[in-house]
Amino acid sequence: MTDRTNPGLMSNPLLPNGRKRRLTPLHKKHRDPTLIPYQPVKRQRANSNAPPNMAHLPGSNNHKMSAGTGGSAGRVGFNNLAKKSNQGKKLVIKNRKVKPDLPENYEAETWSKLAEVIVAVQLQRSISYSLEELYQAVENMCSHKMAANLYSNLRRECDHHVQSLVPKFNQPEMGDSELLLMVSKQWNDHCNQMIMIRSIFLYLDRTYAVPSTSVLSIWDMGLDLFGCHIISPARVQNRVVKGILSLITKERHGETVDRVLLKNLLTMLVDLRMYSEAFETDFLLETETVYRTESLRMMRDTEFTLPEYLSHVDRRLQQEMELLNNYLHKSTRKPLILCVEKQLIGEHLQEILDKGYESLLEAVRVSELSLLYGFFARFKDGLPLMSKAFSDYIKKSGVAIVSDAEREKTMVHELLELKSKVDGIIEKAFKNSQLFQGVVREGFEAVVNRRQNKPAELIVL
């Protein structure tokens, strides 16, 4: 028979072993864990001031309790839990992953497979393994402290292949054009091969080669080997540079050349860090020689007028800019343009003015005068020489007017026309230069002072 005051308990207070049965207080009713679903505590944010969800705990409002010790115990439990939650203990998760042991011959067998793949790439043959499989093999070796040996073996294999190409470039019967084409092709093949090899050994590159200060990255290692064995030897390097300069000279003379070949070869020199030392110095010397010879010939040729010469200089500068845009490195821009300007303009400032500057002023050739002003402005002595010649023109023209007795009646009008003409030239061709404006004032003062009897109208000049 059950106890009606406490259902679920037997009326017999004794257990089968003779011990007294422990009775449960009324306010602590027995809860069968199989009848109450599990409700996990929701994790509170570290910066939240709200108390944790206590709905499922004894002492919460959702579990009615009798007055007395039960309610007090619930409040105490809540306070203790709140204090514990405010302590914000950090949860540390340790990586318990254990690296699996590799077979004793794993390194040798794996390298044998990788070496086979490297040779296949270099000989442009198909690969019998997937890239994922090869990448995983490299990662396994690096993870088990085999990276140094792997890198050393890789470099040795690449070095052996590049050295095997050297005899191709030492054939005495090969012409310069054939050599340039072969260098370009081998360079393209080498770059494509190193891209493929690096993709296979990417894990080695990122975790060992790149962070290291004692070895080169895989890409730079490939560049170093190609430059050392193929391009650095003087015989090949000199012929390559000579061939490039020959193609550029042909293009300057109006001949059609393979610009793609030029671009590829010069890019190769840049990537190999040989552009400045091996090519640029010789290129600028060649440019200086070409334009010095050309300018001297044109200055001596009386059939070349000043407008024709200015047009030629402008066209040459545009051609050199095309070379820069098409295949020369940007570092060559400034020294190249300075070299061309110096040989065509800077070395012949006075000769250019003597070749027809006065005629341009007389005919008010604004376009040519503007071009001349722009060229002369690039040199320290350019504009002073040009302004002095401008002053000489004003004085010569003005004195011719005031000294001619037959032009007495039209003198003032002609001088005003001369003043208007030179002011227009300064505005349209000389960018309203204050230097030239001052020259005009001084020039007309000198003209007016040539007359002893000065008409009142000349005062305004």
Image (spheres, helix red, strand yellow):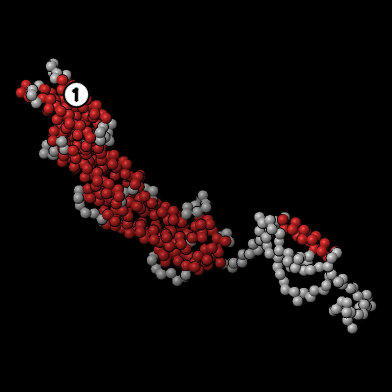
374 vs 52, nearest the viewer: 52
Q: In this view, does 103 lie above or below 289?
A: below
Provide the secondary structure element on which disc 1 rests. helix
Direction from residue 309 to residue 227 in the image, left or right: right
Which residue was labeled with disc 1? 460
Direction from residue 179 to residue 111 in the image, left or right: right
**Image location (x, y in percent) of residue 245:** 27, 48
333 vs 454, nearest the viewer: 454
Task: Say whether residue 381 is visible.
Answer: no
**Image location (x, y in percent) of residue 225:** 41, 54
Residue at 14% over, 30% down: 417
**Residue at the left extreme of this rendering:** 406
84 vs 265, nearest the viewer: 84
Give residue 445's quadrant in the image: top left
**Residue at the right extreme of this rendering:** 18
**Image location (x, y in percent) of residue 143:** 57, 61
Residue at 12% over, 25% down: 412
Locate the N terminus by quadrant. bottom right
**Residue at the front extreme of this rendering:** 67
Task: Say whether residue 228 is visible.
Answer: yes
Q: How crowded is mark 1: few (under 14 residues within 10 Å), some or many (20 or more)?
A: few
**Residue at the bottom extreme of this rendering:** 1
Disc 1 marks a residue whose amino acid type is Val
